[in-house]
Image: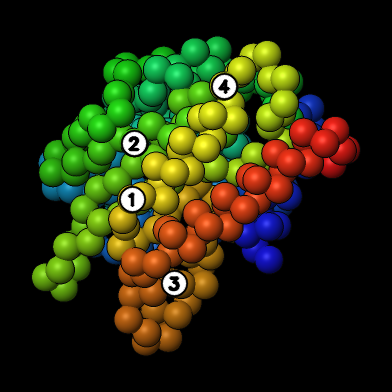
Amino acid sequence: MKFLAAFAALAFASAAQAAVPAEWTAPQAPFRIIGNTYYVGTKDLAVYLIASPKGDVLIDGALVQTVPQIEKNIAALGFKLSGIKLILNTHAHYDHAAGLAQLKKDTGARFDASAGDKPILEAGAISFGPTANVHYPPVTVDHVVKDGETVSAGDVHLTAHLTPGHTPGCTSWTWNETESGKTYRVIDICSVSVAGNPLVNNKAYPRIVEDYRASIAKLKAMHADVFLAPHAGFYDPQGKEAARKAGRPNPFVDSAALQNFMAKAEAAFDKELARQQAGEKP
């Protein structure tokens, strides 16, 4: 149900509304996920900090109004903004990108993103979908990442996996973390939800359906020990953290989580595509 609720929250967020879903701005105390990977976002908008002695990496920027929360969370964990040397993005929708410009300014970090999302990020707006009328502070892309490219800051090395569809440059990220002497593969997927995107006669993005299908197939073929996503509603990190505090082995380690998520995501995509092709109203 949380998976479907998260999809609905994205699909029905009005592009012009001043208010956003409460979970997007609700404060969330930061916590460690695994190794040196930490959750520093809001209750639902996930932002990740991957730390190393020689430089930290931040993934996603949430909203303009949540930047102070993110920065407070980073400080609460004992890290400095100046320690962040690289900022990355999963995709250019405003709920994950609006805070990037301020975070880049406050940290002085390099910002890397895909070629597909670069024009959206640098314009601060996307031309299709339910958020087409939302404008956010544009952010300059310092380096364009290619599919399969590894980018680094300090001892942190992340690999970009282009998974377009949700946006033209949607990018999933993988990296390794070590805990208790074992190495785990971590993935932060870019969203594969339709979330109000037009799949039929999308003149701004004609190959949107083909990209979604290719990205779903690509992610289904991947392996990960730890599954993360841009929205907490996709994988319930708070519940996992509570279970760990209760004494369970790290609940974030679940080699079946990615495939379970992708099975639901593919079914949801097929259903929405069929609905749009039939001309039905949502």
User: Which label's residue is closer to the chain start, 3 or 2?
Assistant: 2
Callout 3: few (<14), some (14-19), or many (20+) C-alpha neighbours within 10 Å? some
Looking at the figure, which quarter contains the N terminus?
A: bottom right
User: Which label's residue is closer to the chain start, 1 or 2?
Assistant: 2
Mark drawn on residue 207: 4
Looking at the figure, which quarter contains the C terminus?
A: top right
Cα distance, mark 3 to mark 1? 25 Å
| Label 4 residue SS | loop
Q: Are marks 1 and 2 in contact (CB under 8 Å)?
A: yes
Does residue 172 appear left or right of residue 277 in this picture?
Answer: left
Residue under label 3: 241
Callout 1: few (<14), some (14-19), or many (20+) C-alpha neighbours within 10 Å? few
Residue under label 1: 222
4 or 3: mark nearer the eye: 4
Percent position of residue 163, x then y? 43, 35
Inspect the image, locate mark 1, and give the three-letter code of the amino acid beneath it: Met
User: Which label's residue is closer to the chain start, 3 or 1?
Assistant: 1
User: Which label's residue is closer to the chain start, 4 or 3?
Assistant: 4
1 or 2: mark nearer the eye: 1
Question: In the depicted view, which residue is nearer to us: 4 or 118?
Answer: 4
Mark drawn on residue 161: 2
Cα distance, mark 3 to mark 2? 27 Å
Does residue 263 appear left or right of residue 222 in this picture?
Answer: right
Residue 210 visible in the snapshot: yes
Most extreme residue toward the bottom is 247
